[in-house]
Amino acid sequence: MKTQCPNPECKKVYQFDDSKIPEAGIFVKCTNCNILFSINKSSGICPKCSHNRKTNDLECSKCGIIYEKYKDNLDTKKEKEPKFQETFNWEATNEKEYRDFKMKWEAAIEKVYRDFKLKWKPAIEKAYGDFKPKWEAAIEKSNRDIKENNEIRKKASEKASEKAKQRDYTELILMRDMNDSQKMVFQSEMNKVRLNRTTGFLLNLFLGGFGAHHFYMRKVGLGVIYALFIWTFIPCFIALIELFFIMKKIDAYNDEKAKEMAAKVLNTIK
C-alpha cells in the first residue's frame, strides 16, 4: 500500500505492508519533514493527484474524481495505446545504426589517411632527401674539426713536454754522475731554490714597476732601485720590456743554481 505525506511542501510517498497495519489505523512520522499523520488499513493515494484516501472513499476529496470510473478510463487508454516496444526493436535498431556509423567512420578515416599519404609522403621524402646530404656534410665537417683540434692539442702538448724536458735537461745531465744519496740531496736542495716561471711572469706583469720580479730572482739591489724610481714610471716601461725575457732569465737562474748545487753536493757528499 502506498501513502503520501500530507505536508504540501514534502509530499513524500511511502510503501507500507497492509498486513502490519491495525484495523483502527496507526500514526506514522515522516522521515523528511517530521510530521505525524495517520494511516488506515487498505488506504492509498489518488491515482490522479496522489492525495491520501481511505478505504471507504469513492471519490477523491481533493480533485473530485471517482476512483472506479477513473480506473476504467485508464484501462481503456492502455488498450488503445499501441504497444510501441513490441512493434519496435531498440536493440536491433541501435546495432544497425552503430554498424552503419562504424563503417562510415572507418571509411572516412581510411580516406583521410590515403589522402595524407598521397600528399605528404612525397613532400616528406623530398625534405628528407634535401636534409640528408646537408646533415651528413655537417657531421663530416664536425668530425674533421674535432680531429684537427685533437691534433693541434697533441702537438701543443708535445711542444710543452719538449720545452719542459729542455728546461730539466741541465739538472738531468748534472745528476748523471751522482749516486742515489747525492741525487736525493740535490733534488731536495733544488726544490728549495728553484724559481717558478709562471710566478715570475705574473710578478713582472703586475708588480714589475716596483721591482718585484727582481726581488723574486734574488736581485735585491736592482729591485730597490726600481722601487725608488717608481714615481718616474721609468721602471714600469722597463718592466714591460723585461716581460718578454723573464722566462729565459728564470731558466738561466735555475741552471746556474743547479750547477752550483751539483758542485757543492759532489764535493761534500761521497
Image (cartoon, helix red, strand yellow):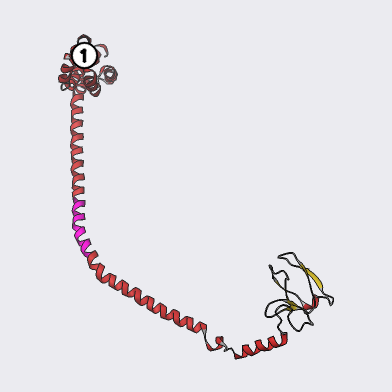
Viewer can see residue 158: yes
Residue 130 image offset from top left, x and y in percent: 19, 60
Was residue 135 drawn as part of the magenta stretch in this picture? yes
Q: Residue furthest right?
A: 24
Was residue 153 drawn as part of the magenta stretch in this picture? no
Magenta part, dominant SS = helix
Viewer can see residue 222: no
Q: Which residue is mark 1?
A: 260
Residue drawn at x 19%, y 35% as measured from the top left: 156
Between 74 and 230, the one nearer to me in the picture: 74
Residue 149 image offset from top left, x and y in percent: 20, 41
Displayed quadrant of residue 158: top left
Between 66 and 169, the one nearer to me in the picture: 66
Q: Which quarter of the rendering shows the C terminus? A: top left
Between 251 and 170, the one nearer to me in the picture: 251
Residue drawn at x 18%, y 39% as measured from the top left: 152
Q: Amino acid at mark 1?
A: Glu
- Magenta stretch in the rendered image: 125-140
